[in-house]
Image (spheres, rainbow, N blue to C red):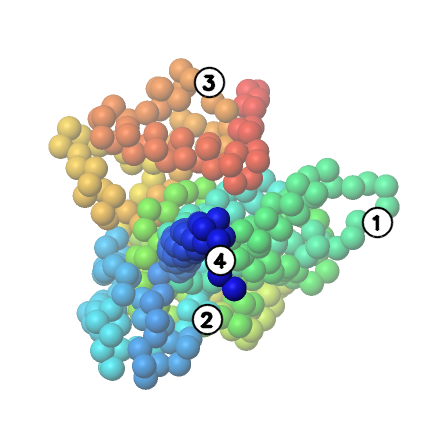
Amino acid sequence: MLLTSAQVSMFASSGVVFVFTLMLFLAGYTLQQKSVSSLQQAIRPNTPAPPPSASPQEVLVQTLPPSRAFGSVLGSAGQRALNLYKSGSPEAKRIDWKRLAHVQLVKDHGEVCSAIMLFEELHAQKSPTQRVLMFPRTWALEERGEILDPYLESTKRLMRAAARRYQVVLRPMTPLVEGTDDSTPSSYSLASLFALSEYDRVMYLQPPGHIFDAGSLASVLAFSPQAPLMSLQSRASPSERSLEMLLVNPSMPSYRHLATRNAKHAEDDLSLLQSSFPYTQDTHTLANAAYLPYTSDLRAATEDFNSTAFLDEASYIRIVDAELPGPEFDVPYPDRVAARPRVPDAEAIWSRVYDGFRVGRMSICGLDLEPLRRE
């Protein structure tokens, strides 16, 4: 059967339409795959595929920098282990990042947002470590009776969001001493860090603050010398501990020892840890590290202040200014201006930290700054 010219023309047109439609589909599919690949790369932690000889959990983190602010903490052996790890050497120490964790421990509702903001920074910087939030067990129990905690629902919302967005493990804790009032923040203790026995090592950073370099903190967790408890020295007294940064090797025997000791003689966190783990430079090499910088330190900056060098040395900065009540409060503008550093480069870092906290408090926690009530 012969085709008419109209039929030939129709088939030709259909063929052309089909070919161009197929080409358009293939082009769109290729672009979609590239976009998906880019998104996957963007959200993937900084943990490239393990070497062929390693198990799936023994990952090689080539992006871990030398521990700049804490270089002396690693010591020569730790620095060598880090360099081998980065190079992919067969001699490199294998790190199970699921056994290392950043931990925040909150005792009341006002501490929750600052803790979650630190987890967001670790997540944004693709820290390979785990993230754990310890909180009073009573918050996880159903309230009974007529008197309800007015802040509990907001806290639960924040914790659920942290678990969903930043893969935070929520860990209820009990008072250190059995039988004490579980509704009182003072019943809970940093000694509970020792109860996290499913981890080989955990790091606690005292909030509020800002993490500049999660990679350096990860290298300290993985490669610094081992000890039951390591901490920085106190600013007030070099022979005493500071609670601003703690490295803990969890163990239930240590936890039970601390609980028993505190049951016999109640002590605050600093006194309990200081007396249970006497602080000596010889055995706790965090003592060789510089203090954690404060935002107030920027006020002492001179005209030769080098902001690049400061940021290169700072892994974590605490937001502490004696003239201000805290970054969570809505301070009158004149008071804030008066507290700013006078050197422009130092002021830029100071404002970056404070403005970042204000924006993060709203975008991460959905909270405005607290009104400042003067007595």
Under mark 3, the amino acid is Pro
Mark 1 crowdedness (10 Å alpha carbons): few <14, some 14-19, many ≥20:
few
Q: Is residue 36 visible?
A: no
Q: Which quadrant holds residue 149?
A: top right
Residue at 36% over, 65% down: 47
Q: What element carries label 4?
A: loop
Under mark 2, the amino acid is Arg
Q: Mark 4 against mark 2, which lies toward the viewer?
A: 4
Relative placement, left or right, of 160 versus 57 is: right
Mark 4 crowdedness (10 Å alpha carbons): few <14, some 14-19, many ≥20:
few
Q: Is residue 156 visible?
A: yes
Mark 3 crowdedness (10 Å alpha carbons): few <14, some 14-19, many ≥20:
few
Relative placement, left or right, of 7 versus 300 is: right
Residue at 32% over, 25% down: 340
On the image, numbered disc 3 is attached to which residue? 332
On the image, numbered disc 2 is attached to which residue? 99
